Each structure stands twice: as C-alpha cells, then as structure tokens.
Image (cartoon, helix red, strand yellow):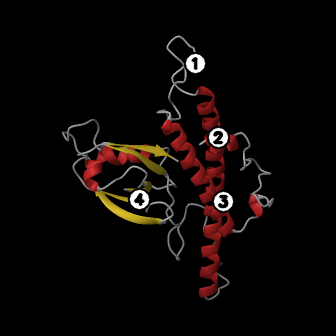
Amino acid sequence: MGLLMDDLHTPSVPTGAAASAPNGVPKEELPLVELIAERDRVQSELLALGTVLESHGVNMRTSLTTFDGFPRDDIDVAQIRTTRARMIHLQNDYKNLMGKIEIGLHAHHAGLAAQSSPAPPASRPATQPTAGQATEQGPVPDTPFAKVNTVEGGSPADTAGLKPGDMVLRFGNATWLNHEKLGKVAETVSQNEGRQIRVVVERQQGSGGGSTQMELQLTPRRGWGGRGLLGCHLLPL
C-alpha cells in the first residue's frame, strides 16, 4: 500500500488540451484502441484508489475534521487528502477520454458503414452520425459508470445476485452516457418499485481471471428488513 501512495504524489495522467499518454503522444492523436487502453488504465487506478479510501472507512465526501474544526486523529488525513486529489484528477481524465472514445467509435462505425454501402445519389448526400447517436453497425459498447460498494444480506440487491465490486454497465435505461451522476439510477428505482429492472454488470473472476458480463433482474421493494429499496450502495466512477 505504501508503494501505491508514493506514486500518488507524481500524477501519471496529466489533464488539459496538451495532455499526453505515457508514450508522449497527445491524447487527441491516439488511435481508438490506445484511447480505450488508456481508459482501462485510468479506471483500474481509480478502483485501486477507491480501495485505499475504503480501507480508512471513508469516501469522497466524508468529513476529515472534528465537529470543532480540528483534523481527525483516527484516520490518516494527509493520505486521504492525497488520494482524493488524485481521484478527482483521474475522474476528469476519465471523462475526457470517454468523450474522445465516443467520437472515435462513431467515426469507426461510420467508416464501416461507408465501406459496406453504395455511394448515395448526388441528390441525397450521406450524413455523418453525431456524438450520442447509434449507427447502423450497432450501439456504442457499454462502459462501467458505477461500482457496487456494499450489498446488504437478504436485500433486493442480494437476492438479484449483485456483489460488492461489480461494475455497473446498465441499470434499466441508465448508461455511462446519461446516468447524470447516478441521478437516472435513483429515478429508475423510484419509478419501478415492485417491478423488475434489468441490470448489466461486469464481475472480476478472481486474481488475474479476467471479467464476466452478467445480466441480473433487480426488483426494488420495501419491507425487506433494511433501509432503502435496494439494500446496496453504488459509487459513481
């Protein structure tokens, strides 16, 4: 853990218009496959840093001071502040990368469509898809936008098969493109009490075992013996 925290003091993914990947190439010039690889690297570091916060029993919003304004002495305040700062830095990079990946995917699908379709008549010029639109080649691949932090035993989330550490790809109609800081997830839950919601997650298969995509059916309900309609806690990525 000490090695991880030492690395936190030297950001490895700079932000801004001149930001470059580890190989020194500006992110704006990276091919799509390398943008996706860089996204995965940033996501992995965010997950590792989230584990650091969890080890201290805090999150991004937990107060680090006592009621009278003094730093808490039961936690490593300096380490937590450093971790939070790094996570904010990486979250901004993640959003920047996702925007570039979305544009790159649409351009890639548009190119495939152009290669497989005859040229349109002169009177009907071809149009290019814009960001946020799906192409004839299929929708933009799902990307994790939240992590399952905790699951209460006997809760609707537990019954559905959700596990801590699951990465949420879809929650009803909520995806990484429209979840609005999980606001759409909360809206989906409140509007579907007693009805099944399709949830797609990505689950790690042990150390070095890769990951598996799973589709679950989650039914929000009251009276299961705990708080809320789900009995789980999600962390936005």
Q: Which residue is mark 4?
A: 201
Q: Is residue 119 above or below residue 24?
A: below
Give the residue type at disc 3: Glu
Label 1 secondary element: loop
Q: Which residue is mark 2?
A: 5
Q: Which residue is mark 3?
A: 38
Give the residue type at disc 4: Val
Residue 47 image point, x, y percent: 54, 49
Task: Name the residue: 72% across, 49% down.
Answer: 12
Q: Are the residues tagged 2 and 1 within 8 Å (C-beta)? A: no
Label 3 secondary element: helix
Q: Residues within 10 Å of mark 4 (few under 14, many from 20)?
A: many
Front label number (1 vs 3): 1
> Reading the chain from its start, which is encountered first: label 4 or label 1?
1
Residue 91 image point, x, y percent: 61, 46
Front label number (2 vs 1): 2
Residue that protrudes farthest toward the top in the picture? 68
Q: CA distance from mark 4 to mark 1?
A: 38 Å
